[in-house]
Amino acid sequence: MFNDYTLTQCCTISRFYSRYKLGWEIKAEQKREIFIRLRAMLRFIFFLMCLLQLRQVLSVMGAVTPKPIIINGTYINPELGKYHARLRTLARSCLDIKEKHGASQDGMYILTTESGTYYQAFCDMTTAGGGWTLVASVHENNIKGKCSLGDRWSSQQGNDQNLPEGDGTWANTVTFGSAEASTSDDYKNPGYYDISAQDVSVWHVPNNEQLKSWTSSAILRYHTDSQFLTEHGGNLYHLFKKYPMKFGAGQCKSDMGPSSPVVYDTGDKDSTANLYGPSVGKEFESGFITFRVFNADQAAVAMCSGVKPIECNPQHYCIGGGGFFSERQQCGDFTALEQASKHLTQSAVLLFYR
């Protein structure tokens, strides 16, 4: 069927195709090799550039000599020192910062809890030796609103006999608000339940006052030095666990919680009594701070600022409470303080530990 010529032509074509295919494969292999070499070369160039850049950075760093900011225990730049002392360490309390690092400037500092929660707190580094940590504030946003929205230190759920403990803020770990806004809203930070303290300090500061003016504008400031907290768990959280804020949990006078004498920083016994008004002057003794007391109806109030009750109507001069009062108009953060001075009812109560 095929003659010799045809066979010869077929062989020639076959050899030509084989050579063409082989040449194409060789070219493809060469291309891959060129690509691999080029990629390796680019990597090497990039590596050299990185080395040169690193050399420049190291030479610049070597040329910079860090300048000390503290010489012989004193800051070269006092203004810089104020901020450096706040940033160079994390501590559990303002007292820790003062004792361990010599901080002496009032202001905001970063603290940490035992479990590692960070938070910002105001530190009073000057009053009576300093080291006071602001942990809470009680602010009355509407004295006519009885256990209504904003009454976090009593109940925001209305005057309800089925909720005798109210919101339970005095003895729980719920936090809210911010330190700088302590005079404009309720405030409670983790230090309230985490810090182990001995004493308390209380400031009554007009509502909406800016932080820088708290000390100078306060209408009443005092602190304890009896170390009474050491007998009650080291803070108010543990104190109120021991003395529950609950309607019907005790009787007037016989079941009163701890009371401690105070040292005045602004004001005195007479000015304290005047703040609560003449109608209740015979109900208490000035110069103390008292916690968890009951009125004649067995309603619990949390804190009697600057006074110790001697009769059974603490709702007229104490703050905070449980979730139920026999008389509805007494339920709220500022209970039944309508007869007190406006200077008092229009001021926030700031609570410190040391």
Image (cartoon, rainbow, N blue to C red):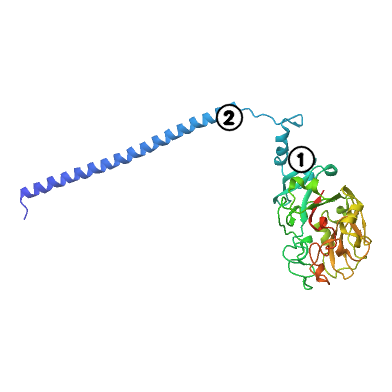
Q: Are marks 2 and 1 in contact (CB under 8 Å)?
A: no
- For marks 2 and 1, give the CA distance: 33 Å
Residue behind mark 2: 61
Dot 2 or dot 1: first in sequence order is 2
- Work out which quarter of the rendered image holds the N terminus and state it: bottom left
**Between 276 and 74, which is closer to the camera in this rendering?**
276
**Residue at the far top in the pictured view:** 63
Q: Amino acid at mark 1?
A: Gln
Residue 86 drawn at (x, y percent)? 72, 41
Answer with left or right where residue 4 lies relative to residue 83.
left
Q: Residues within 10 Å of mark 2 (few under 14, many from 20)?
A: few
Q: Secondary structure at mark 1?
A: loop
Is there any visible trace of residue 198 in the rendered image?
Answer: no
**Between 354 and 204, which is closer to the camera in this rendering?**
204
Answer with left or right where residue 227 lies relative to residue 39.
right
Answer with left or right where residue 117 lies relative to residue 241.
left
Answer with left or right where residue 354 lies relative to residue 255.
left
| In this rendering, the label closer to the viewer, 2 or 1 | 1
Q: Amino acid at mark 2?
A: Met
**Residue at the far bottom in the pictured view:** 162
Residue 241 drawn at (x, y percent)? 82, 61
Q: Residues within 10 Å of mark 1 (few under 14, many from 20)?
A: some
Residue 321 drawn at (x, y percent)? 81, 64
Residue behind mark 1: 105
Question: Going 46% across and 32% down the picture, which residue do you hit?
Answer: 49
**Between 237 and 30, which is closer to the camera in this rendering?**
237
Q: Secondary structure at mark 2?
A: helix
**Between 164 and 310, which is closer to the camera in this rendering?**
310
